[in-house]
Image: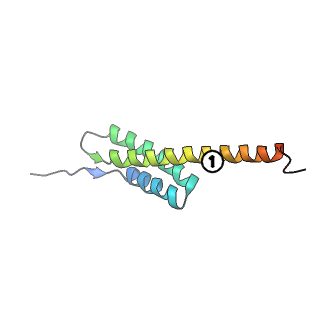
Amino acid sequence: MNTVYPRTSSLAIVSLVFGILAYVFLPLVGALVAVICGHSARSEIRRAPPGTIDGDGLALAGLILGWIQLACAVVAIGFLILFFFGVVAFGGFH
């Protein structure tokens, strides 16, 4: 009897690793890679025959980490823009 074990999606592992790295070393690039690889991994897992590829949870975790990091980056950039407009408006630079 041959037992076939499901393999873990490489893209799901990459998504999770870059989702974690986005908080430590690669803020924007890591988040983008995590989101792209996470979506690719989840579609790969869904297209494969049932039970042949695992890693949907890993891909989902990478997606969540990546999207949270991207949202934080957008908020931070928005605050920086508002800060510099406030400095200019209140006479910080003449």
- Where in the figure is residue 68, as x and y percent of width and height? 50, 45
Give the residue at mark 1.
Answer: 76
- Where in the figure is residue 4, as x and y percent of width and height? 19, 50
The residue type indicated by label 1 comes to Ala
In the image as oriented, which residue stretches furthest toward the front?
A: 90
Which residue is more in the foreground, 77 or 13?
Answer: 77
Q: Residue at x 44, y 42 (%)?
A: 39
Q: Secondary structure at mark 1?
A: helix
- Where in the figure is residue 30, as x and y percent of width and height? 52, 54
Q: Residue at x 49, y 58 (%)?
A: 21
Q: Residue at x 56, y 55 (%)?
A: 27
Q: Residue at x 48, y 50 (%)?
A: 34
In the image as oriented, which residue stretches furthest toward the bottom?
A: 25
Location of residue 47 (image quadrant) = top left
Location of residue 40 (image quadrant) = top left
- Mark 1 surroundings: few (<14), some (14-19) or many (≥20) residues within 10 A: few
Direction from residue 89 to residue 17 in the image, left or right: left
- Where in the figure is residue 5, as x and y percent of width and height? 21, 52
Which residue is more in the foreground, 60 or 83?
Answer: 83
Direction from residue 77 to residue 23 in the image, left or right: left
Which residue is more in the foreground, 21 or 15?
Answer: 21
In the image as oriented, which residue stretches furthest toward the right?
A: 94
Q: How many marks?
A: 1
Colouring of the image:
rainbow
